[in-house]
Image (cartoon, rainbow, N blue to C red):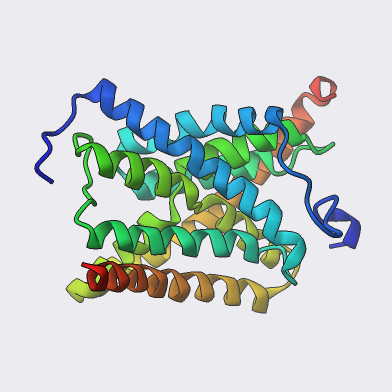
Amino acid sequence: MALAPLPPPEAALLVALGAVPGAWLRFWLVNQLEPRLPRRHWGTFAVNLAACFGLGLLIAAGHHERGRAASALPLLLGTGFLGSLSTFSTLAAELEASLRQGERRQALGLALGSLLGGLLALLAGRGLGGWLG
Amino acid sequence: MTPSSRREGSQGKSPPPRPEELLLVALGAVPGALLRWLLQADPLANVLGCLVIGIVSVSKPARPRAMLLVGIGFCGSLTTFSGWILALESALGRGSMSGVALLLLELVAGVLAVLTGRGLAGRLARCRPRLRR
């Protein structure tokens, strides 16, 4: 927190440096998880929850800041890595696909599960982070 | 949905990602995350990403490279689920029911944006059928 805000070129570089492994991890994990899970949508669900847990840890560690001129760690880990690890567009696309195929209960389960699971994962990460000091 | 329209190779273990796939995901993830950071407006980034993923999700024949670059890389990193959950948690913490309602509406808007993107892609494909490989 004591770090000064970074000027934009360095800040952009940090966001990009965090985004690439975040997107790679999401791609790899979804590919690994989907064949093992009964329904394909739960791979993205799991990755999204993991990102919420990570965000909770980051907040507990005092390294979460928003804004274009945040300091280095929030930009790299928060905006870059965790922002790219989690995805809203795939969730929406999976909800749309479920609804289009008439699987309303699956869509509702995915929406509510993501919402409640995401909140719980965030709180769990923050709680664990706080407990670890 | 027929079983064959599920991801290919969903039986057993997934092969590790190929370098070409990782490159495409990274090339999409960097501009996606940078755009989200520059916009400083997650709802806008999320709905925009949903629109774009809707467009790429309908390409027929399926174009896996476009999906890796634009869908998994760009849209996945442009949109953020962890940011959405954090906004939801802080709206709940403030007791702001209008804030919660707006965030729930964001998910509905995302699903509608996917639908709109699919519609747009269908129109584009009809306008220039010869351009598709």
| Quadrant location of the C terminus of chain A in the rendered image | bottom left
Where residue A126 sits, quadrant-wise, is bottom left
Total labels: the figure holds: 0
- Taking depth in this image into account, of B94 and A62 the one nearest to the observer is A62
Q: For residue B81, which quarter of the picture?
A: bottom left
Which residue is painted at 85% across and 24% down in the image? B133
Which residue is rendered at x = 47% and y = 74% of the image? A117
Q: Position of residue B27 (x, y in %)?
A: 55, 27
Q: Does residue B80 appear to the left or right of B58 in the view shown?
A: left
Rendering coords of residue A18 (x, y %): 41, 38
- Nearer to me, B110 or A38: A38
Q: Is residue A36 left or right of residue B2?
A: left
Q: Measuring from the top left, give residue B76's x and y in whole percent.
A: 53, 44
Residue toward you, A39 or B97: A39
Residue B108 seen in the current view: no
The image shows residue A53, relative to residue A63, as above or below, that is below
Name the residue located 48 percent from the left edge and 65 percent from the top edge.
A49
Mark yes or no: residue B65 visible: yes
Q: Position of residue A132 (x, y in %)?
A: 26, 69
